[in-house]
Amino acid sequence: MLPTLLLAALLAAAPKHHAHASPRPVEHPGAKAFARELAREAAVTHPGLSAKHIEQALAKARYQQSIIDAITRPAESKPWKDYRPLFLGQARIDQGIAFYEAERASLMALSERHGVPPEIVVAIVGVETQYGKNLGKYKALDALATLAFHYPPREEFFRGELKQLFLLEGPAFPYKIEELQGSYAGAMGMGQFMPSSIARHAVDGDGDGRLDLWRSRDDALASVANYLENYGWERGAPIADPASVPEGMDVAALEAQGLEPRYTVGALAAVGVTAAVARAPEMPVSLLGLDGASGREHWLTYRNFYVLSRYNRSPLYCMAVHQLALAIAAGVPPKPAQAPATP
């Protein structure tokens, strides 16, 4: 063991890493070719988007090592027993109940239009950004440029998202792309939409002619509901039920089939796997196993659980949304009965 004074001297001399240090400017490999390619592809739909404009914007994008670090250590790599407390604390539940009550009228209208329960929309916004309180600390341009040009494992995906970021610019979009803040992966707004999701699923919920997923709750909530409907949300259908498996039965092969339903309730019941809630035998279903605080737990998951995975592919994320939604719905007081009109 080093003597105390020597250890202190070494620590004092060590380079300091400040969380808010300015990211270093780095020339992005292939940025010029990217700019020419995007300008050529967008010539018809976005004739004003020049290669020069794209290059100038990319020159302002800063490489951030913390983004590379974050994407290689996502929260979804944790076991369920450690992941669940991140999103199912009482404070987040209480905030969700208050958010639901504040937006009740809009949420009810969206549920009627899209078929998605209000508590699911609220829970997604709650998991993603704590109901709009944490919209992300990175510039979207920095995040997407870092991942598009410096992260080979998913370079193709993030190049596509970076292209779409430039294509968002227009009269219906209220911000310059250099101003946009989001997550380390470039997801933005209360619902954390990637640029391609904004292009495909975002809607103008408040009718002001603009898409503002950062400050307009109406736009953000309507966009989340529209996203889930577009991916096939089934109105009134279940999401997931606790399941029982026979003691000693190896269900690894059943779990390995993924979240898209490939069995039926009846087929699983025939081998002893049953849900805590009676469902129609022909209902499509999958079996999910999670490492919970009390050991291995099993769930039957249905089509709507799979739809949640189109928002985020992690089964931990989907289960967190599902359970947070249940907790919020249980805590929301019923709407007061309207007093009869005075004759």
Image (cartoon, rainbow, N blue to C red):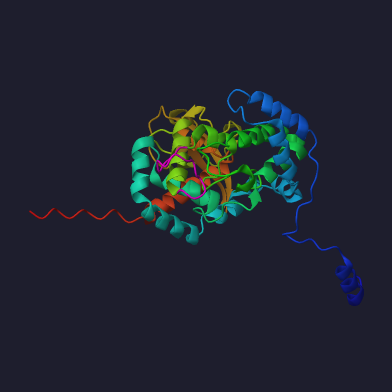
Q: Nearer the viewer, residue 249 or 335?
A: 335
On the image, the x and y values in percent for residue 160 come to 66, 31
Q: Nearer the viewer, residue 106 or 297?
A: 106
Name the image quarter holding residue 312.
Answer: top right
Q: Nearer the viewer, residue 66 or 178?
A: 178
- What type of secondary structure mainly makes up the magenta span? loop
Query: Which residue of the protein is positioned furthest toward the top in this rendering?
Result: 44
Q: Is residue 200 above or below residue 141?
A: above
Residue 211 among magenta residues? yes
Residue 236 visible (yes or no) = no
Residue 230 visible (yes or no) = yes
Residue in view at x 41 percent, y 38 percent: 238
- Give the tally of numbered discs: 0
On the image, the x and y values in percent for residue 132 come to 51, 53
Q: Is residue 305 above or below residue 12?
A: above
On the image, the x and y values in percent for residue 232 come to 45, 30
Residue in view at x 14 percent, y 53 percent: 340
Name the image quarter holding residue 121.
Answer: top left
Q: Which segment is the magenta one?
A: 203-216
Residue 81 among magenta residues? no
Q: Nearer the viewer, residue 244 or 109?
A: 109
Query: Which residue of the protein is positioned furthest toward the left in this rendering?
Result: 343
Residue in view at x 67 percent, y 28 percent: 39
Left or right placement of residue 168 versus residue 141 in this view: left
Q: Is residue 323 above or below residue 282?
A: below
Q: Quadrant of the N terminus?
A: bottom right
